[in-house]
Amino acid sequence: MKPYKTGLFSLVFVGLYVVFSFHPQLVSAQGRSASVFLSPSIGTFTVGSTFTVSILLNTSGNFVNAIEANLTFPPEKLQVVSPTTGKSMIQVWTAQPTFSNSAGTMKFQGAVPSPGISTESGLISTVTFRVKNTGTATVRIADSSQVLLNDGRGTDVLGQTTDGLYYLTLPPPAGPIVTSATHPDQEHWYPAKNVVFRWEGFPDSDGFSYVLNDLPVDEPDDISERNQTGVSYRDLADGIQYFHIKRLRSGVWGGVTSYKIQIDATPPAEFPIEVSPSTYTSQQRPIIDFKTTDSMSGVDHYEMKFISLDVALASEGASQGENTPFFIEATSPYSQALDIGRYDVVVRAFDRAGNFSQSTERLTIVHQIFEIIRGEGVRIGGTYTVRWPYVGIFSTMVLLLVAYFARKLWKWHREIEEKLQAGPHTHPVIAGKLAELKQKQSEYGGIKSGMPLAMLLLCIVGFSLFFRTAHAQGTTLREARVPIEPPVITLFPKSLSNDEIFYVGGNAGVPDAQVLVYIQDAERGNTFSYSVVTDKKGSWFYSLPQFLNTGHYLVWTQLKVVDELSPPSSRLDLTVGPTAIQFGKDRLSYQDFYLILVFILAALFIGLLGFIIYHWYHFRSKSRRFLEQVKQAEESIQRGFLVLRRDIEQELSFIQKTKFGKGLSDEERFREEKLLKDFETISSYVGKEIWELEKSEQSMS
């Protein structure tokens, strides 16, 4: 057996060796993946020039026989001018290579006959681009690209792609050197709509010709604009524009210099602030979401600020004002641990030109209603902590109260059951009628119908409960870039109550200057002034250290630089609403008042609801039984009175016959009068329906 096994193993080894020797792709396929890359992958090119990019393949030792390369490029910056596949390693094109300068796409799809190809830098195609505009252009290899292995199954082994990144600039100056004091950096966005250009002057210059348009490469006309060395443009539109200039010397025009300016004076779009889980929450680390767009230069970054509306937190923040930034840069979603209190969340979205759009949202963080503190007890409303012994005592009292109430209900049901078992004679109405019926029957010889008395003894006690429940239910953004003007207010509360502190902030455009804040009581005429110093960027912020009383106020500011005062800013209206209840200096807000009221009403509602559901259920079930049994009892009693009435009628008939035959004695006359009186009384107990029932029974009999 040993020689047999040795020969078998040798045969398997030789077979594998032969297979992998003639088909190396089966070995390499288990190794590295193929890659498609561009060459050059980075470069700098000028507007108007062309450059060629090669699309290359590295199979990493694999033998491949099919390739699909899909590329994208920015059509506003690049244009395909001469794609070529003449030197491509692809021998059979399964689809004609195509490109689109409007969509910015290219597609190459071909194959290599078996056994395929293995290469480290195989050329798929070359593409020549023309630079249309300045900026940064990325030529990407799309995810839909494929490199298929020659394994009979078409396994995709493309594992890596390398895109191309190209910097597109204006041609070097061929004419006068141009500078701009208003827009010094050609790659930077500016909000200023007024532009000033300067260029060097030469003694032998005969003049200059220049033009401003949206073409990155252009040549001014041959009409001289005199021998000046500067020009200014006012109120230009947003976007990218180019200034082209050339110089005339000795009757000959020189080369052209192009200068790019980028203007964006429009702030980003207005946007909402989303707070999770809500703007009124007990979560001390809420999540702040914000997002907007900018159609021109694009959103650069966001800044945000939490402004406390409570005196204690505001005083603490003021004491740390030197170490706390006015606004902090943030990204969405943003989360920060906050203390219990009320805040105005202010978010500013800046574009690349420095314009910003601002949104404000009111955030209230409250204590949890009930919070279990391990080792201490239960904290109520984040303020009062009930120790565990007292929690046990209170719980025991509640249990005893519930048990007492349950016992009362149990006794009440027992009494009802006893009355049901005792029979209908316990019902006052039935008992009264039944007693009178028995008395009359004893006088007139009893009921002849033989109806059992037990069928009359049915009764039920009913009741109803009625209840009622009651329930209760930005700022205009402007930039202050002129230091002589009064301070611009960009932070101002949308609404304010007399238990929230007042704040105001903005930009003065002058660092380390003094901003005077004036608050005038419009009803009483009193005016108060406060001062705050701007920071190094000219920004300022002030929060009042105490509450404002209810009323209407006017707010304005002034800028003080050394001893010079700016004109007053425009006046803003501020209405301070009242809180629900105020006890001296202590103020109970509407929210707190409504919260307490809701808790009280909720507790009353839950208690009443449980009470009503319980008793309503028993009322409905026993009421049905009561109506059926009382109906039967009344019908039986009425039938008893009916039989009794027949007996009286018979006796009256006998007396009438005796009366016509002979005169009545005094005793018989007295009995006749009593019979007539009892007849009228019994008739009042018997209704129309009973008499009709009697007639129907007589007709049936």
Image: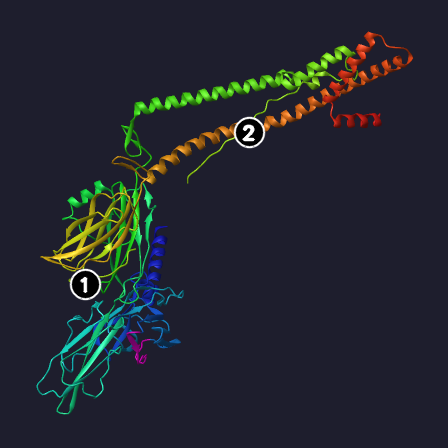
Q: Which residue is mark 2?
A: 617
Instruction: From the viewer's side, name the closer residue of 613 and 218.
Output: 613
- Packing grade of label 2 (10 A; few <14, some 14-19, many >=20) is few
Residue 476, above or below 442: below
Q: Quadrant of the C terminus?
A: top right
User: Residue 639: horizontal and vertical position, in percent?
Assistant: 75, 21
Q: Which label's residue is closer to the chain start, 1 or 2?
A: 1
Which secondary structure dominates the residues rendered in magenta? loop
Q: Which residue is mark 1?
A: 481
Q: Position of residue 680 (x, y in %)?
A: 75, 19
Q: Find out whether residue 24 is within the magenta segment.
A: no
Which region of the structure is painted magenta?
76-89
Circle 2: residue type? Tyr
Answer left or right for 620 relative to 102. right
Crowding around mark 1 (Cα neighbors within 10 Å: few <14, some 14 to 19, many 20+) is some
Q: Is residue 32 visible?
A: yes
- Amino acid type at image mark 1: Arg
- 22 over 338 or under it: above or below: below
Q: Using the image as rendered, state which of residue 384 and residue 438 is in the foreground.
A: 438
Image quarter for residue 41?
A: bottom left
Q: Nearer the viewer, residue 234 or 223?
A: 234
Q: Give the side of residue 132 with respect to residue 407, left or right.
A: left
Q: Quadrant of residue 143?
A: bottom left
Q: Nearer the viewer, mark 1 or mark 2?
A: 1
Q: Residue at x 37, y 50 (%)?
A: 1
Q: Name the image quarter holding residue 374.
A: top left
**Above/below status of 175 relative to 582:** below
Residue 338 at x, y = what percent? Answer: 25, 43
Whether 88 is among the magenta residues is yes
- Residue at mark 1 to residue at mark 2: CA–CA distance: 75 Å
